[in-house]
Structures are given as C-alpha cells and as structure tokens.
Amino acid sequence: MDVVIEVLSHRHHRETFDCGYELLDNYLKHYATQDIKRRLNRVFVAVDSNSSGRLCAYYGLCAGTVDASSLPQEMSKRLPKYPVPVVLLSRLAVDREYQGQGLGTIMLVDALRRIIHASDVLAVYAVVVDAIDVRAADFYKQFGYIPLPSNPLKLFIPVDSIRQLVE
Ligand SMILES: CC(C)(COP(=O)(O)OP(=O)(O)OC[C@H]1O[C@@H](n2cnc3c(N)ncnc32)[C@H](O)[C@@H]1OP(=O)(O)O)[C@@H](O)C(=O)NCCC(=O)NCCS
C-alpha cells in the first residue's frame, strides 16, 4: 500500500469515508475541521497515492490529563496526586476497503512518532485512547496498551514504552 500521511485540510475529500462506525465517519465529515480551527484537535489523514488521493484513514491528537489515581497502583504510587499530562489519541479509523492490510498499524505508529517528537518539548507521561468498543480495545492491547482499572474502554501506554514500540 502506498499512502502518504498528512494534516487534514480542505483539499481532502471525506464524503465517501466509511469505517463501519457512523460516529467516526461523521466526526471526520462534519466536526473535524471545526475542532482544528478551535485548536481542540489535530487531525491526520492517510491518502492513497495509487487512488487519486483517496482518504483512507484518519486519527486525532490533543493534549489532556488523567488523574494518577485512575492508573494501575504500581504506577500511581510513583506519581504525584495531581493530574498527569497525557496525549489523547482519538478516533483512529480506517476505511472498510483498506482494513486488514496494516494501515491501522501504520497510523498508530505514525501517531506515536509524532507524540515522541512532541514530548521533547512538552512533558507527556502517557498516551491515552478511547476505544469505541471491546474489539477496538483488543486492537490497542496487542500493542501494549493497558486498560484503566475503572474503564476497560480507556487504555493508556506510558511514553517510555512507546519509544521501544516505534524503534
Ligand atoms: C481497528 C482498526 C483501526 C484497525 O485497522 P486495520 O488497518 O484494519 O488494522 P491492521 O491491518 O493494521 O491490523 C493489525 C493487527 O490488528 C488486528 N486487528 C485489526 N482490527 C482489529 C480489531 N478490531 N480488534 C482486534 N484486532 C484487530 C489484525 O488482525 C492485525 O493483527 P495481525 O498483525 O496479528 O494480523 C480498523 O479496523 C477500524 O478503523 N475499525 C473501525 C473503527 C475502530 O474500531 N477504531 C478503533 C479506535 S476507536
């Protein structure tokens, strides 16, 4: 597969994007641009170079925090009581026609590389994802993401661990 990953802009055609989850399709089609303008999210898209620039996947990144007390005890005991800085990786989605060909993995690794880069100038303890359902949570778990004890659909991975994953 020959894809280029770039920042979402007005040049990208999103009308036909279909990942099988209307919520995720609608975000890309109707809300992503607004969120980017308001500095609430950064959205990256994969474009198929062999199919006249068809948009085949996307994900969003924004800053956030989690309470240390929501993390597993072996981590929280080494952290302060106030919220710790994280990056929220939101709404990773691959168009149905492109699923099962490694693109989800390519997007995830691309996101993690950008986060490592950002963490050189801005402290990031972990990456947090909100999985849309149990299957999506399973997708993240295979890369080492750990569910929060209080919410199995919210998973995190410490930045120290993602360095190994992308290298
Ligand atoms: C989940 C999703 C992003 C995966 O993308 P993809 O391009 O199909 O995944 P890949 O081809 O990179 O698959 C990588 C591995 O994950 C596994 N996998 C793919 N989708 C999975 C899922 N939903 N649950 C568990 N494992 C999954 C694959 O079997 C593969 O494992 P292998 O390397 O051992 O064969 C994609 O299926 C999708 O967009 N689904 C709908 C939206 C969604 O669930 N988003 C998740 C975050 S909310």
Image (cartoon, rainbow, N blue to C red):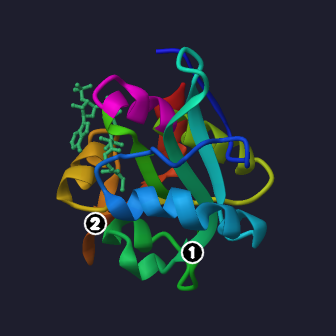
Residue at 61 percent of width and 62 percent of height? 32
Residue pointed to by mark 2: 153
| Furthest residue toward right | 121
Which sits in the foreground, 153 or 11? 11
Q: Amino acid at mark 2?
A: Leu
Q: Is residue 130 visible?
A: no
Q: Residues within 10 Å of mark 2 (few under 14, many from 20)?
A: many
Instruction: Give the number of the mark in front: 1 or 2.
Output: 2
Q: Position of residue 127 (x, y in %)?
A: 51, 56
Left or right, residue 122 beside residue 89: right
- Quadrant in which the C terminus appears: top right
Which sits in the foreground, 155 or 90? 90
Image mark count = 2
Q: Position of residue 94 (x, y in %)?
A: 40, 40
Q: Position of residue 37 (x, y in %)?
A: 77, 67
Main SS of residues in magenta:
helix
Vertical arrangement, residue 97 with respect to residue 141, above or below: above
User: For residue 64, what is the image quadrant?
Assistant: bottom right
Left or right, residue 35 beside residue 75: right
Residue at 22 percent of width and 48 percent of height? 138
Q: Quadrant of ligand 1?
A: top left
Residue 101 is covered by the magenta coloring? yes
Q: Amino acid at mark 1?
A: Thr
| Furthest residue toward left | 134
* Cβ–Cβ under 8 Å for marks 1 and 2: no
Vertical arrangement, residue 130 with respect to residue 3, above or below: below
Vertical arrangement, residue 3 with respect to residue 95, above or below: above
Vertical arrangement, residue 53 with respect to residue 45, above or below: above
Query: What segment carries the magenta color?
Result: 97-107
Residue pointed to by mark 1: 65
